[in-house]
Image: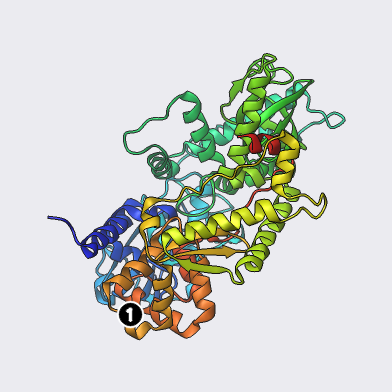
Amino acid sequence: MAKTKKQKADERRARKKKQGKSKRQGIPKILRQDPALREALNHRHPLVACLINEDWQEFGVAIVIVMRSAPIGCVYSGFLVDVLGVGLKDVMGDYGVNEDEIKEHKFLEGMQGGDMVACDYGLASNLVYGGLVWARKWKFKLPKDYKIWMRLLEPRNMDEIELSQFGKDGKPLVMVSEDDFDIIMGADIDSNILRDPIATENKAIPENTLNRLGDIKSTLINFSRSPEFKEDFEMARKSRFGKKKRPKNEGEWINFQDWFVLECELMSGGTIIDRYFETYQDKMRRDVQELINGWKQVIEGLFEIKDRIENGYFVKNLINERAYKVYPTNVSEPLIELHKGDFFIGRIVPARGVHIFSGAFTPIPLDGNDRVRNEMYQMAARMQTENPARALADNPEKLKKSREAVQRQYNDFINYFGKDEVFGTGKEIRQNYQDFFDYQIFELQDPDTGLTKAEEFEKMTGKSYKPPKPKLPHKLLRNKDVAMLCDPVDSLTLLEEYGLFLKIFTDPDKHLGTSYAEDVVMGYLESDTISDVPFRRVAKRYPENFKTVIDYYAEQDGFVTGGLEDLMQAFKPESYDKLPGIVVVMDQEIANARLKR
């Protein structure tokens, strides 16, 4: 028996809740399995109370409890903070309980007459976050689920956490000898690696400095293998490769690990590099800290070797169209013999005005083959279109020109259609799409050359330009309610059921409570391919109706929102700092290769 549309929609939402749209927000397994807990653990819920044991300063152990009022009842997080010793030692929590039930928790067993009393939220936050930073600083093992229960606390800047009340004489009070203490703390990093200045010679990088950069990178990699990051690593691995899927080759595995160390956002916020700074900042020179912090800016691309230089290469990244001096960090064992004109696919990171290789890379020898070179330029053109983030990284001029191109397209769209939204059936929208494309190619003239794009193509190739037919999904073509939107940042977007989407916000009383309205609104919210643009448009046009609709579904589906920005942060976090929908190719050879594809 065929499933109804409503049954399919219900299954889709259930699957979303179970598996995780939340995966994009880094939600741990326990919260994916318990959506109610996930929604309850939110620092935006009203604060009910903060409690602390009255004798915490006398005994150096604080029991901190933070309670908030969630839509499903009282939710609380409890933290056991060993102020003199190991910092944040244990965590717990629950929801749908009252204050008396909280006070019966095992945390409070064996207390020596120290009653739980009300305390200021600032004190509670300082003790919990201070316990976290203290434990990280001295490499004490953190509680397994601390990231989950800390969701009830407002986020803090770790660099601003005050630690003066922790430990004794600046060190944890532990019942071991000084030598044993150093062993427990894992004092296996040669402090000179982080304290010595990074030498340069007339802006060149000497061999011993290159080798030292490799040593610094090794300490960072070893730090990332701490038990504290095991859960983050496993979640990232499963997200990238699936539960059983393995990487295609060793290079893919190496690059995944390099990405995890340098770029992965941890569930608790920040990156491995941020945690590394918290642990070793007292041992680091400023130039070393600046060096490591720069490694967050990874450049991935298809590189052409333009020349050989001492100990390295002068290359051009064909994806972001920037030139770099690149060096291996182990000069005695070069990565591979690359020559002028060869290519490679890889990752590089900044290092004192130059760049070094990071992770694995794939060499592509040219061997004097012009066909291979042309293929590389065509590949670069395709990669620029497929990955705007890489194409626009580290190139402000390219980013500026791309933004200007989207704005021009937006103006052209309005000049052609008279508005920035066009409605119709799927087939009508396909024709509108083709008509607008033809208008841009055959009618609009370049202000500098006076030629249309079609005329430029004919001048370059000697052939007449034949525009490709737009290939749109069959499902969209069969739909009777399709819209083409143009946005000055996103560029062109095709949306199904957009007419109905607008009607829901135009007349909420008529549509709220129907299954089709829920399918459309929640479908738009949960979609990974629909941006924030539709929601921003209806919020601007119908502000009161927008609040009515979103509040209704927030109550029905149990999510929390304080307005448009909260909603977008929860469902469309990628919409912030987004890149333009058009990537301008500045290199003429790459542009020509794109035209010849």
In the figure, residue 478 lies in which quadrant? bottom left
Residue 399 appears at what percent x and percent y?
Answer: 70, 51
Outermost residue, left side? 1
Outermost residue, right side? 202
- Asked whether, in this view, residue 519 is left or right of residue 316, the answer is left
Quadrant containing the N terminus in the rendered view:
bottom left
Q: How many marks?
A: 1
Color scheme of the displayed model? rainbow
Residue 469 appears anywhere in the view: yes
- Asked whether, in this view, residue 407 is left or right of residue 496, the answer is right
- Asked whether, in this view, residue 364 is left or right of residue 591, the answer is left
Residue 32 appears at what percent x and percent y?
Answer: 31, 56
Q: Residues within 10 Å of mark 1 (few under 14, many from 20)?
A: some
Judging by the rendered image, the residue that carries numbered circle 1 is: 511
Q: In the image shown, does 118 or 539 lie closer to the viewer?
A: 539
Three-letter amino acid code at disc 1? His
Q: Residue at x 35, y 39 (%)?
A: 242
Q: Secondary structure at mark 1?
A: helix
Q: Residue at x 47, y 30 (%)?
A: 253
Q: In the image shown, does 147 or 425 lie closer to the viewer?
A: 425
Location of residue 477 with respect to 307 vertically, above or below: below
Q: Residue at x 48, y 70 (%)?
A: 535
Q: In the image shown, does 95 or 373 lie closer to the viewer?
A: 373
Residue 74 appears at what percent x and percent y?
Answer: 31, 75
Location of residue 69 with respect to 410 vertically, above or below: below
Location of residue 206 with respect to 320 vertically, above or below: above
Residue 47 appears anywhere in the view: no
Residue 438 appears at what percent x and percent y?
Answer: 61, 53
Quadrant containing the C terminus in the rendered view:
top right
